[in-house]
Image (cartoon, rainbow, N blue to C red):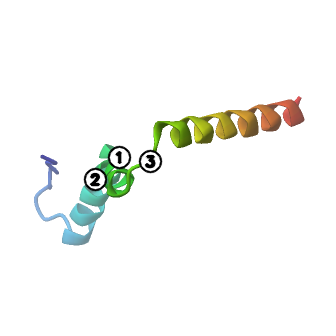
Amino acid sequence: MIIVQVKEGENIEKALKKFKRKFEKTGIVKELRGRQAFEKPSVVNRKKMMKAVYVQKLRSVEE
């Protein structure tokens, strides 16, 4: 459960902004989207490898 501390006389928009920020940091929405469709483990591994290759290329270009 997400709890947001609201100060006395604080604007409701600020409280909503704090709530949204905390909600995004928990990663609930990201996890739900990932669970909507099953991905085979081989596909997950392939994506990880592609990401690793991409990051490695970026780092080699920086040097």
Which label sits on residue 25? 1
Q: Nearer the viewer, residue 53 or 28?
A: 53
Circles 1 and 3: CB distance less than 8 Å? Answer: no
Residue 26 in the image, given as x and y percentages of width and height:
30, 44
Q: Residues within 10 Å of mark 1 (few under 14, many from 20)?
A: few
Where on the picture, by quarter, is residue 54? top right
Q: Secondary structure at mark 3?
A: loop
Above or below for 53 versus 16: above
Q: Secondary structure at mark 1?
A: helix
Q: Which amino acid, mark 3?
A: Glu
Residue at left offset 12%, top offset 46%? 1
Count the labels in the image. Answer: 3
Residue 8 in the image, given as x and y percentages of width and height:
10, 59
Q: Which residue is mark 2?
A: 23
Q: Residues within 10 Å of mark 2 (few under 14, many from 20)?
A: some
Q: Secondary structure at mark 2?
A: helix
The residues tagged by marks 3 and 2 sit, at their Cα atoms, a distance apart of 25 Å
Q: Which residue is mark 3?
A: 39
Q: Nearer the viewer, residue 46 or 56?
A: 46
* Residue 23 as seen in the image, left or right of residue 6: right
Q: Nearer the viewer, residue 2 or 13?
A: 2
The residues tagged by marks 1 and 2 sit, at their Cα atoms, a distance apart of 5 Å
Q: Nearer the viewer, mark 3 or mark 2?
A: 3
Q: Which amino acid, mark 1?
A: Lys
* Residue 24 as seen in the image, left or right of residue 57: left
Q: Nearer the viewer, mark 1 or mark 3?
A: 3
Where on the picture, by quarter, is residue 36? bottom left
**Which of marks 2 and 3 precedes in the sequence?**
2
* Residue 14 as seen in the image, left or right of residue 43: left
